[in-house]
């Protein structure tokens, strides 16, 4: 398992870093890795969501012993449970490998930041669309820029913090 992890980590780094040179003048490598890994994981999330919603759940309500879950929410939950650990893995080993924090602390902090990002998406969309009357698509674009910026800074300085002597 250790060999697979080592191979996978290096493979992902080689692929991501291969595409970095054209972006070298506009962003640091770590920011590019964050954008590439986050963008790839987001695309995977959307793909899993679409497949789950349309073909697995077939747009039907999911009944559990506790409650009924609408198909779009159930698809969101399923895609979240798949892409959350992938996003954490990519952040921990590809984007922010220099963090000194224990893995369980990183995982907890990563989860907290992800929950805050979900909440921020909801709040900004409600504000921009419902309160300010903006169109939904531009609202989503502005929301995405704000939340991704918050997420990057939070993950970098909170979830995967570097030791003080390394940070300077």
Image (cartoon, grey):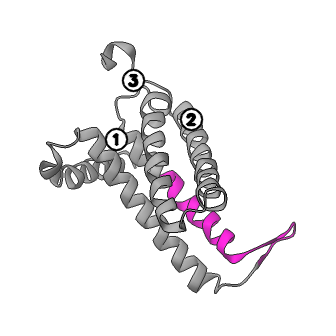
Total numbered badges shown on the rendered structure? 3
Q: Is residue 52 left or right of residue 39?
A: right
Marks 1,2: beta carbons within 8 A: no
Give the mark nearer the N terminus: 1 vs 2: 1
Image disc number at residue 162: 3
Please determine whether, in this image, residue 166 is positioned above or below residue 9.
above
- The crowd level at tag 2 (other Cα within 10 Å; few <14, some 14-19, many 20+) is some
Nearer to the camera, 68 or 90: 68
Give the mark nearer the N terminus: 2 vs 3: 2
Q: Is residue 113 left or right of residue 9?
A: right
Is residue 71 one of those drawn in magenta? yes
Q: Residue furthest top?
A: 165
Q: Which residue is mark 1?
A: 95
Q: Secondary structure at mark 1?
A: helix
Q: Which residue is mark 2?
A: 109
Residue visible at 43% across and 66% down in the picture: 44
Q: Is residue 104 left or right of residue 153?
A: right
Where does the image place residue 120, in percent across and percent down from the top left?
60, 48
Please determine whether, in this image, residue 55 is positioned above or below residue 15.
below
Between the residue at mark 2 and the residue at mark 3, the CA separation in whole angstroms equals: 14 Å
Image quarter (top left, top right, bottom left or bottom right) of the C terminus: top left
Give the residues in magenta.
62-85
Between the residue at mark 1 and the residue at mark 2, the CA separation in whole angstroms equals: 15 Å
Where does the image place residue 102, in percent across and percent down from the top left?
50, 28
Nearer to the camera, 44 or 89: 44
């Amino acid at each position: 398992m250790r060999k697979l992890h080592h191979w996978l980590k290096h493979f992902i780094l080689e692929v991501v870093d291969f595409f970095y040179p054209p972006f070298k003048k506009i962003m640091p490598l770590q920011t590019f890795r964050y954008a590439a890994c986050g963008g790839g994981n987001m695309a995977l999330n959307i793909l899993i969501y679409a497949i789950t919603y349309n073909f697995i759940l077939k747009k039907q309500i999911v009944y559990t012993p506790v409650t009924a879950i609408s198909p779009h929410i159930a698809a969101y939950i399923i895609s979240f449970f798949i892409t959350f650990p992938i996003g954490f893995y990519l952040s921990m080993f590809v984007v922010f490998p220099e963090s000194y924090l224990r893995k369980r602390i990183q995982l907890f902090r990563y989860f907290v930041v992800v929950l805050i990002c979900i909440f921020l998406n909801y709040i900004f969309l409600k504000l921009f669309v419902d309160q300010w009357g903006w169109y939904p698509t531009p609202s989503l674009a502005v929301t995405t820029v704000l939340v991704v910026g918050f997420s990057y800074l939070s993950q970098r300085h909170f979830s995967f913090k570097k030791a003080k002597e390394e940070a300077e």
